[in-house]
Image (cartoon, rainbow, N blue to C red):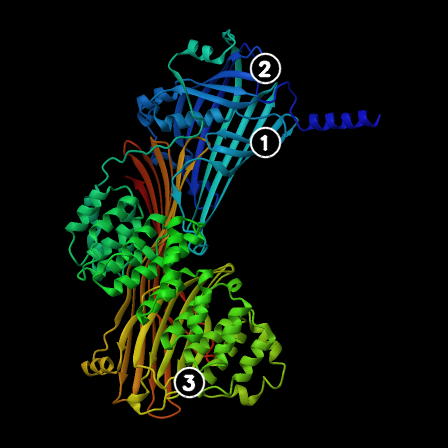
């Protein structure tokens, strides 16, 4: 009885989870012709769901479906014929009215006669147990038309029972889940599981990347094992993570309805399906059900050379501060990605010196095999005359949005050759480190080229004898952040001299928390507390920063606090400011600091009343519910009042993921002799030096030297030149997402997001003995453009949505110190200029014949400039004022 009960329950469960019928999939009656109506429509909008704001189109037809053959060995082995008739194309937005691009045009004019004939030719579908075994069509039909027929045929693949399985259809080989209940079946396709070859790439970093989401749900209404109605909806949504106004959505729907049935000619006799197909039409051939790639021909599009000539005026050096320069840069990259090596080389060789650096930026940023071959053939690294072009090439490589192993191999090969400039040799190694980091982040750490590059960095650092080579490999390791390089960094931090020790410490500072082990922190504690040897202030403060950033213990924090008061005068003030900044900004270490401060020995007036001019401050540039932008500035002076180090940082956060946007560090040492001052402990024998080091978007660049040595200092002072020195200048491609989608309906979609900027960072250091004054100045100017482009193409009609935002901004930091008396006077300024912010939207529908509709909207606002607080005594957040301008819009024919 128990066994019978169990069997009965299993039967009931199986019955309730399936649709009534004797087959596992759809089953057609032997002598019936099924008459259905079919439509597929697509909408594009910004995700607001308002039909009036969308663009798109609808393709509709009548459909005849008939069973040609059923295997004598089983009902679930069927061959059916599907024929589209009376095809029509129209707007999905009926409010278009007179502006409709389809108005007054016949289907044959829109689709074109040969395409329409191909679309209305029947296809055959071999189904076994409801799943597609083979798809038969005619050879040499246009791929776009075959895809539309694949989209219709794929709707006939289904099963009548619940469960999860893998199916191959137009979307690829996908995981699908069926939910069956009475006369209804729901099929949910996991689009992210679909295996299909499509071009595409993305920026892997979360802050600069995009978030995309895709869903596909098909609902079947079943009667007598055949469909009465099918409704399928596929949605693809995309948004840029740090600027969510750059967003778009594609909604694609298919609808199939049974209208009537008629008598058919009956089944074809035979045991083998191949013989049946040959009897129907010997021209039929089996082709993949998976959608095929096609490219629409561009009529009247300019050649690469013509396009370059139309935009090159915007890339003149004087125009790089304008957003139009970035627009031209991004547009030209798209064109370069379709160009051959010979075309690119021809333009490179013909261009003049003024615009050539910008052209090198664009060619390198295209990141195609042809563009890489062209630029490597064009540049001569053995020549010292083209250093600027070589440096621009290397910077573009460093910021490559999706670098590959071939690029890394090319630079590794170049490094092993000879150079006309030692600066370029250093830059090549530094950029190799940056590429290793990016490839490892993208799961490419085990690639042969990456392994070779890692060995090159580590072995080079281990064997380096010259100071310049040690610094070069340390900078490369600072970019690569290899875990296996930590022991070498610890060695150079603790035993190295001067700049080498400081650089190794700053390299350790960039590692994530899991890599800062107890061994690393023990070494940092020894350095900070000078247990084994005397260290410079810059090295000691960096060691303290590493400790405080990486889950410091109670005793580590207590010992740092107890050291305040025993340090050199300005270092006392600096460390006190660091601790106060941690508390004020609620940094991760703040909880532990508060616990220690409960002890009177650590928290007392004597310790917290130390005077000086050194400072540390962190604040918000902007803050929203899901993102934040922060700035920080810490300045360390020597006891004589001369700048020792200033460190300006800007971070962008998406939730908890950071992007180190900018770091500009100005360092000076050995200048006390100029004003007859006494150097601080451990810094008595330092050479006179001043320089600037920059980190941009997580990439450490080659440092710039203002002067090195006493004679160089005096010659520059006597020349009385305070002209700013360029740290980095160029056009960068930061955001680069391209996604080609095969929609279930057969249409092809593309979702692209690009973001670029023109950047110019300069730095200057002025020193006057007469006025006993020093001044440092760092100026950042950027123009930014971000665009999103979403299109859906059928080869004969195309709909598109373009959205974007652009701005031009400037940020300047100035520190002035007058050391004619003590305490010396310090003035710190960080100013942001007024920022114009423009948003635009373009929607269009266009026929392959050239006729089209376009709608444009534009909105402008002015974000007021402000001065950011740099001291804890003045901690009011910079208030940003928006001055919106009237929105403009237009629409019409083109």
Q: Where does residue 126 sit, x and y in percent of width and height?
A: 49, 19
Q: Is residue 765 left or right of residue 487?
A: left
Say which residue label 2 marks: 75
| Vertical comparison of 285 with 775: above or below | above
Q: Which mark is residue 186?
A: 1
Is mark 3 in CB contact (under 8 Å) with mark 2? Answer: no
Label 2 environment density (alpha carbons within 10 Å; few <14, some 14–19, many ≥20): some
| Vertical comparison of 148 with 453: above or below | above
Residue at image point 53% right, 16% down: 78
Q: Is residue 677 left or right of residue 742?
A: left
Q: Residue 517 or 181: which is nearer the viewer?
A: 517
Residue at image point 48% right, 86% down: 567
Q: Where does residue 33 sit, x and y in percent of width and height?
A: 51, 13
SS for callout 1: strand
Q: Which mark is residue 145?
A: none
Of labels 1 and 3, earlier in sequence is 1
SS for callout 2: loop
SS for callout 3: loop
Q: Residue 60 or 171: which is nearer the viewer?
A: 171
């Amino acid at each position: 009885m128990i066994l019978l009960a169990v069997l009965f329950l299993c039967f009931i469960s199986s019955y309730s989870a399936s649709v009534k019928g004797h087959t596992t999939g759809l089953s057609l009656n032997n002598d019936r012709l099924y008459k259905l109506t079919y439509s597929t429509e697509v909408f594009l909008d910004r995700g607001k769901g308002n039909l009036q704001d969308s663009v798109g189109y609808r393709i509709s037809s009548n459909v005849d479906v008939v069973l040609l053959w059923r295997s004598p060995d089983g009902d679930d082995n069927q061959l059916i014929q599907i024929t589209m008739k009376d095809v029509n194309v129209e707007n999905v937005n009926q409010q278009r009215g007179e502006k409709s691009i389809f108005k007054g045009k016949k289907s044959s004019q829109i689709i074109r006669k040969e395409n329409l004939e191909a679309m209305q030719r029947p296809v055959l579908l071999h189904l076994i147990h409801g799943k597609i075994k083979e798809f038969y069509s005619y050879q040499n039909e246009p791929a776009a038309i075959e895809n539309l027929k694949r989209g219709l045929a794929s709707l006939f693949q289904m099963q009548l029972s619940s469960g999860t399985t893998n199916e191959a259809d137009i979307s690829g080989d996908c995981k699908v889940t069926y939910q069956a209940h009475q006369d209804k079946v729901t099929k949910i396709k996991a689009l992210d599981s679909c295996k299909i070859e499509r071009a595409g790439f993305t920026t892997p970093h979360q802050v600069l990347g995009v978030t995309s989401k895709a869903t596909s749900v098909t609902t079947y209404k079943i009667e007598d094992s055949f469909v009465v109605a099918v409704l399928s909806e596929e949605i693809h949504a995309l948004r840029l993570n740090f600027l969510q106004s750059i967003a778009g959505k594609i909604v694609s729907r298919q609808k199939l309805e049974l209208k009537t049935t008629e008598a058919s000619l009956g089944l074809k006799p035979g045991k083998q399906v191949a013989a049946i197909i040959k009897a129907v039409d010997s021209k039929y051939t089996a082709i993949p059900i998976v959608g095929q790639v096609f490219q629409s021909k561009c009529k009247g599009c300019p050649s690469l050379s013509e396009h370059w000539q139309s935009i090159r005026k915007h890339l003149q050096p004087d125009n790089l501060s304008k957003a139009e320069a970035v627009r031209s840069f991004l547009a030209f990259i798209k064109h370069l990605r379709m160009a051959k090596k010979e075309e690119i080389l021809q333009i490179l060789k013909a261009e003049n010196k003024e615009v050539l650096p910008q052209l090198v930026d664009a060619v390198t940023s295209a990141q195609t095999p042809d563009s890489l071959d062209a630029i490597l053939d064009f540049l001569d690294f053995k020549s010292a005359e083209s250093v600027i072009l070589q440096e621009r090439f290397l910077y573009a490589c460093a910021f490559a949005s999706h670098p590959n192993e071939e690029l890394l191999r090319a630079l590794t090969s170049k490094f092993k050759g000879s150079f006309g400039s030692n600066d370029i040799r250093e830059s090549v190694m530094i950029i190799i480190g940056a590429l290793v980091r990016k490839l490892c982040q993208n799961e490419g750490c085990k690639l042969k080229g990456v392994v070779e590059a890692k060995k090159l960095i580590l072995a080079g650092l281990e064997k380096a004898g010259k100071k310049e080579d040690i610094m070069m490999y340390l900078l490369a390791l600072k970019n690569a952040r290899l875990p296996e390089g930590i022991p070498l960094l610890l060695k150079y931090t603790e035993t190295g001299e001067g700049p080498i020790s400081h650089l190794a410490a700053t390299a350790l500072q960039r590692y994530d928390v899991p890599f800062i082990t107890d061994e690393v922190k023990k070494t940092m504690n020894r350095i900070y507390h000078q247990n084994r040897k005397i260290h410079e202030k810059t090295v000691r403060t960096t060691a303290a920063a590493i400790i405080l950033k990486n889950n410091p213990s109670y005793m580590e924090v207590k010992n740092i606090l107890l050291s305040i008061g025993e340090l050199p005068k300005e270092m006392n003030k600096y460390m006190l400011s660091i601790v106060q900044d941690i508390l004020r900004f609620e940094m991760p270490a703040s909880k532990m600091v508060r616990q220690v401060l409960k002890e009177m020995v650590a928290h007392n007036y004597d310790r917290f009343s130390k005077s000086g001019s050194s400072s540390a401050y962190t604040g918000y540039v902007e803050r929203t519910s899901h993102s934040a932008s922060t700035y920080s500035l810490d300045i360390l002076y020597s006891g004589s009042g001369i700048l020792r180090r200033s460190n300006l940082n800007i971070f962008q956060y998406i939730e908890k993921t950071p992007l180190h946007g900018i770091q500009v560090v100005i360092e000076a040492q050995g200048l006390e002799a100029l004003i007859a001052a006494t150097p601080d402990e451990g810094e008595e024998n330092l050479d006179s030096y001043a320089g600037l080091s920059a980190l941009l978007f997580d990439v450490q660049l080659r440092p710039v030297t203002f002067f090195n040595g006493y004679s160089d200092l005096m010659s520059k002072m006597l020349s009385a030149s305070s002209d700013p020195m360029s740290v980095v200048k160029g056009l960068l491609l930061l955001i680069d997402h391209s996604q080609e989608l095969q929609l279930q309906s057969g249409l092809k979609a593309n979702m692209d997001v690009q973001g670029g900027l023109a950047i110019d960072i300069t730095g200057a250091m002025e020193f006057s003995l007469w006025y006993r004054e020093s001044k440092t100045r760092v100026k950042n100017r950027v123009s930014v453009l971000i665009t999103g482009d979403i299109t859906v193409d059928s080869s004969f009609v195309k709909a598109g949505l373009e959205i974007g935002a652009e701005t031009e901004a400037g940020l300047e930091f100035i520190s002035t110190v007058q050391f004619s008396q003590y305490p010396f006077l310090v003035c710190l300024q960080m100013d942001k200029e007024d920022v114009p912010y423009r948003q635009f939207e373009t929607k269009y529908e266009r026929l392959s014949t050239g006729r089209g509709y376009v709608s444009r909207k534009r909105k402008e606002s002015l974000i007021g400039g402000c001065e950011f607080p740099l001291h804890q005594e003045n901690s009011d957040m910079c208030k940003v004022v928006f001055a919106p301008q009237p929105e403009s819009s237009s629409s019409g024919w083109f």
